[in-house]
Image (tube, rainbow, N blue to C red):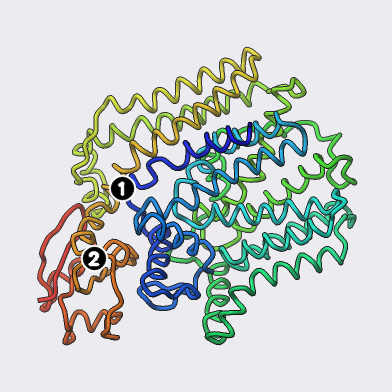
Amino acid sequence: MKYLLIALVAALLFIPFLGAVHLFDWDEINFAEAAREMIVSHNYSQVQIDFRPFWEKPPLFIWMQAGSMLLFGVNDFAARLPNAIIGIATLLTLFAIGKKLADEKMGMWWALVYAGSWLPHFYFKSGIIDPTFNYFIFLAIYFAYRIAYSNRSYRMAMLSGFFLGLAVLTKGPVAILVSMLTLVVYWLWNKFRIGIRLAHLGLIALFASITTLLWFGYEIIAHGWWFVNEFVTYQIRLLTTEDAGHGGPFFYHWVVLLIGCFPASIFLFSYIRGRKKTIYGQPAATEQKDFKVWMWILFWVVLILFSIVKTKIVHYSSLCYFPLSYLAAYQVYKLSSGKLRLRGWNIALVCVVGILLGIAIALLPLVGVYKDMIIPYIGDKFAAANLQAGVSWSAAETGYGIAYMLLVIISTVLLYKRKITNGLVCLFVSTMVIIPVTVVHFVPKLERYSQGAAIDFFISLQGKDVYVKALGYHSYAQHYYTREQPHSNKNYPNTDWLLNGAIDKPAYFICRITDSGEFIHHPNLEVIGEKNGFVFLKRK
């Protein structure tokens, strides 16, 4: 009965309004466009963008999106639905594992902590790869941990390898890197004692290989090594260089997890206390304590690895959400059972971070209402033009942020008065409720500023036999929202040919006003419109 209840609540949290806002450039539109092109081209073995090979990602998640689009049509809802389904599966899995490790109460707390934290919840409403990848790699590590405690250890190894293979097919060999580092660090931390034998490692490797070869093997046999070589080369470049200008300081992901995973992240600080009874570096006394070791190691491996990696993007550290939420839920579980006492500074930190988030939500409508006063102080010409979008705001909408602040304050008062369970439930449930309210109410308005004019332009060209090209910046939106079909003329990817060559059908272009100088004066182009920082042009 509780599994059904969790599934229903998760479905209500993650599925409604998935198509209420356009997909965001780049990642969301990138993957959705690859799925759409699979359907158009009937080529399901290779990932394509612009109907040319795209070797940056394996196909599993894109297959999931393509299947969703075949059922519900090519639209934004279908592109995001696979992650919503993964969200339901994730909360059910957390409850099941928590119940096995301790009891149903622990399982419920873990599911609540995960669903009641900002980024972990929000990502199930997106169309990016990471929630699905994180789920598969977490299961791979969980079944590897189970090897030492199951009388069916070889089955656990097979399952670990199977899910590791699915993770590789979802995002690539980074799954193997994370898994190997986690295993090696656990082995070193536990003073070379581990319940996983060579036979288990062999089964993990075998089943991971079989799973990944279902695609890699077919691809090599059908098309040779070129596609796979390009894929591996890209993965190496991504780890060693800044990609697409996404750089950042070493502590980038530390800040992302602290703020983005509120309130769960705050409860990690409750581990800062006397450590004389710690089991780290000693043989694990119980399954639960050993699982906690695995989660701490996974957390630090992912956090440090992606702090070192040159490319810094918010979702790169999202695999931390699983161990972070478990470690937080474990503390919450002990707090609610009276086995742990929450310190005053912990409560104060909950209050401060929660109020800051509430202030940020409350300020959003005010920026919209008083944008004319703010725009003169914005140094970025493109951003200032974005704010000119006709988006309706009301000062009354600050009530969402104020309501969240009040709920956080009520939660902290309850915690301070030692009504721990009530305070914790209030904190996580209020966050779990405010997230979809914020997403439904604010995200569409923010999207109108950031890309709304561009998306409208592309949609206006749907069904027309034309070329559409973004100039001066990279985008996938022109392919997806024009519902581009394969072009017979092989010169179409060549920007110079589109601008100066003997084109065989109309060509439309878009650029940002900050890059428009050379294009608005181009002898072969005429400006047909300008809106919210974007300039629209057509080949004469």
Q: Nearer the viewer, residue 5 or 307?
A: 5
- 491 relative to 200, above or below: below
Taking 60 as reference, is 88 above or below it?
A: above
Q: Residues within 10 Å of mark 2 (few under 14, many from 20)?
A: some
The image shows residue 415 at horizontal and vertical percentages of 61, 18
Residue at 31%, 44% (x, y): give it: 446
Instruction: Tell me: 165 left or right of 55.
Output: right
Report the number of numbered marks: 2
Residue that extends furthest to the top in the rendered view of this protein:
417
Relative to 433, residue 459 above or below? below
What amino acid does circle 1 point to? Answer: Glu
Question: Residue 110 location, x and y as percent?
Answer: 65, 36
Q: Residues within 10 Å of mark 1 (few under 14, many from 20)?
A: some
Please name the residue shown 28% across and 65% down the image: 483
Callout 2 secondary element: helix
- Quarter of the picture holding the N terminus: top right
Q: Quadrant of the C terminus?
A: bottom left
Q: Is residue 410 left or right of residue 100?
A: left
- At which x and y percent is residue 407? 48, 21
Q: Which mark is residue 185?
A: none
Q: Are marks 1 and 2 in contact (CB under 8 Å)?
A: no
Side of 187 where 9 appears, left or right: left
Q: CA distance from mark 1 to mark 2?
A: 21 Å
Mark nearer the N terminus (1 vs 2)? 1
Q: Which residue does the image show at 29% across and 51% down from the upper left?
A: 450
Mark 1, residue position: 447
Kind of residue at badge 2: Asp
For this rendering, which residue is in front, 220 or 416? 220
Label 1 SS: helix
Q: Residue at x 48, y 63 (%)?
A: 62
Circle number at residue 515:
2
